[in-house]
Image (spheres, helix red, strand yellow):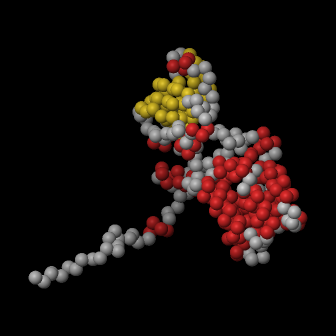
């Protein structure tokens, strides 16, 4: 099993070490001393620039993205950024099942299998209309869909962009929709859950299941919304007692969940349920993005973030009310000793 012992976020200038990495970008460039390799190496904590200078560079004729390599080198600083100067490199010839992917790709803090089980439990407990229950069961028990869901991120580089991210996002959107339907009892609670479950299903096909997470041809040409409808259609056709008007509403909710035309939505929400799904999806995506930025700021001790293009704003890390709560006594729960003198 290929795994790691040192991660990018642990590196400091001057460190010498040997470890395993995956190449996510490679380029053979030219310096005054001859050709050199300009690499980007990745693990679950980030991406690191690496250089193979002459004469070592001439030993490698082909270094490709998504190739696993054992690297020995020294960490140096260049223009205030850490980079690895490679002293030795050996490519690995391995099968996918021999890789501990959680070491090389960002992963959800929650186990994907656990999240998938929670989605199935929600469907069993919340869906009373038998055709909805049948549809969800058939889709979630399909081996290809199940396998893709367990690996898929929810996006290439913004919200939930890690293994299990699509399931994490789907589960959160489902719970938000159920909570909002409790505040607005006239809502169709069941179709909200079904739409939340399937709204981003096509993302498991939109992005390739590779390390670099490139857009697939389907993703580039159709997009995840159209892919979702294509994937669901054969399952819908098999549920003979599913009311056509409910199917129409479900498809509208999926088509309109991006909210506005300028955000890639083929349709704008035209029902209350479609509006709730749109806001639930948007809220969870933005809060996840903000949460990742604020977590990094907390580690760095900063109060203001750099400008966030996806949110079109700077972010501020506020003081939390909980920091003013009275501190618990360390010896709470331990019986206090009597200060009176003991009788002899």
Residue 205 in view in this figure: yes
Q: How many marks?
A: 0
In this view, which residue lies farthest toward the left?
Answer: 344
In this view, which residue lies farthest toward the bottom?
Answer: 343
Residue 218 placement (x, y as % from top left): 79, 42
- Nearest to the observer: residue 320 or residue 37: 37
Q: Does residue 114 appear to the left or right of 230 in the view shown?
A: left
Q: Does residue 313 appear to the left or right of 141 in the view shown?
A: left
Answer above or below: position of 230 versus 190: above
- Nearest to the observer: residue 29 or residue 151: 151
Residue for point 52% across, 51% down: 296
Residue for point 60% across, 26% down: 63
Residue for point 85% across, 65% down: 242
Residue 199 in view in this figure: no
Question: In which quarter of the view is residue 58 placed?
Answer: top right
Answer above or below: position of 339 versus 33: below
- Nearest to the observer: residue 319 or residue 223: 223
In this view, which residue lies farthest toward the right?
Answer: 244
Residue 316 placement (x, y as % from top left): 56, 57
Residue for point 74% across, 53% down: 142
Residue 174 placement (x, y as % from top left): 69, 64
Task: Give the quarter of the figure containing the C terminus.
Answer: bottom left
């Amino acid at each position: 099993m290929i795994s790691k012992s040192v991660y990018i976020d642990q590196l400091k200038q001057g460190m010498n070490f040997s470890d395993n990495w995956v190449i996510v970008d490679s380029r053979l460039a030219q310096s005054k001393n001859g050709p050199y390799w300009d690499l980007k190496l990745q693990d679950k904590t980030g991406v690191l620039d690496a250089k193979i200078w002459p004469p070592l560079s001439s030993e490698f004729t082909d270094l490709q993205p998504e190739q696993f390599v054992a690297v020995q080198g020294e960490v140096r600083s260049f223009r205030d950024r850490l980079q690895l100067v490679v002293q030795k490199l050996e490519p690995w010839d391995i099968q996918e099942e021999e890789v501990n992917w959680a070491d090389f790709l960002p992963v959800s803090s929650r186990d994907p299998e656990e999240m998938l089980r929670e989605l199935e439990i929600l469907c069993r407990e919340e869906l009373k209309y038998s055709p909805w229950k049948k549809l969800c069961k058939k889709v979630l028990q399909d081996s290809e869909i199940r396998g893709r869901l367990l690996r898929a991120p929810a996006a290439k580089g913004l919200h939930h962009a890690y293994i299990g991210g699509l399931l994490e996002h789907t589960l959160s959107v489902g719970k938000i929709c159920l909570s909002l339907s409790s505040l607005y009892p006239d809502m169709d609670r069941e179709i909200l859950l079904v739409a939340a479950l399937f709204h981003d299903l096509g993302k498991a096909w939109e992005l390739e299941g590779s390390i670099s997470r490139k857009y697939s041809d389907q993703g580039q040409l159709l997009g995840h919304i159209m892919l979702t409808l294509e994937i669901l259609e054969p399952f819908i056709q098999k549920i003979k007692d599913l009311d056509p008007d409910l199917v129409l509403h479900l498809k509208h909710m999926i088509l309109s969940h991006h909210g506005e035309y300028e955000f890639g939505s083929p349709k704008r929400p035209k029902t209350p349920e479609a509006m709730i799904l749109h806001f639930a999806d948007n809220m969870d995506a933005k809060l996840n993005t903000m949460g990742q930025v604020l977590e990094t700021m907390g580690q760095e001790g900063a109060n203001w973030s750099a400008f966030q293009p996806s949110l079109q704003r700077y972010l501020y890390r506020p003081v939390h009310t909980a920091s003013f709560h009275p501190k618990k006594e360390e010896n709470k729960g331990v019986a206090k000793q009597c200060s009176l003198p003991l009788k002899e």
